[in-house]
Image (cartoon, rainbow, N blue to C red):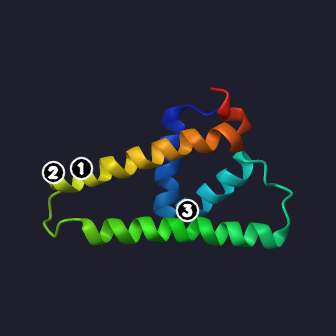
Amino acid sequence: MADRAYLERLTKELADSGWLIEAGWVGLRVATDLIDAPADQLAQMRATFFAGAQHLLGSIMTFLDEQQEITEADMRRMDLIQNELDTFIVEFAKTHMPTQGSA
């Protein structure tokens, strides 16, 4: 299994190369055992995955304060997003990610 430092480097490389969201989609397919799902289902799920990513990024770009420096309000908003997503993934893993749900 990959160590945390490797995964952090990989994430940065994927972001720098413009493949971060696609890699996340592929990771979700593997983690949830969707390898053999029907093509139309995968296309719809991929579109939904990317739509969620687009919504999140668009929202972040809208709420960030216009200053050059990150503000306390910006950090609070980002923390709230992280908390929301952390809560989601714990619940999601219980039923959709067999390797994670029992942890």
Q: In the picture shown, does residue 80 fall above or below 103?
A: below
Spatial CA distance of label 2 from label 3 is 27 Å
Quarter of image, res 93 = top right
Which circle's residue, 2 or 3, is located before the other in the chain?
3
Residue where numbered disc 2 is placed: 72
Spatial CA distance of label 1 from label 3 is 24 Å
Question: Which amino acid type is shown beneath numbered disc 2?
Answer: Glu
Question: Which amino acid type is shown beneath numbered disc 1?
Answer: Arg
| Label ID, residue 76 | 1
Which circle's residue, 1 or 3, is located before the other in the chain?
3
Residue 86 percent across, percent down from the top left: 47, 42
- Tell me whether circle 2 and circle 1 mark residues in contact (CB < 8 Å): yes
Q: Secondary structure at mark 2?
A: helix
Q: In the picture shown, does residue 101 fall above or below 76?
A: above
Quarter of image, res 68 = bottom left
Which is closer to the viewer, label 1 or label 3? Answer: 1
Q: Identify the residue at image location x=18%, y=55%.
A: 73
Q: Identify the residue at image location x=67%, y=27%.
A: 102
Q: Is residue 28 left or right of residue 57?
A: right
Residue where numbered disc 3 is placed: 21
User: Number of numbered discs present?
Assistant: 3
Q: Identify the residue at image location x=71%, y=34%.
A: 99
Q: As rendered, which of 89 and 3 lies closer to the eye?
A: 89
Which quarter of the figure is the N terminus placed in? top right
User: Outermost residue toward the top?
Assistant: 103
Label 2: few (<14), some (14–19) or many (≥20) C-alpha neighbours in 10 Å: few
Q: Identify the residue at image location x=48%, y=35%.
A: 5
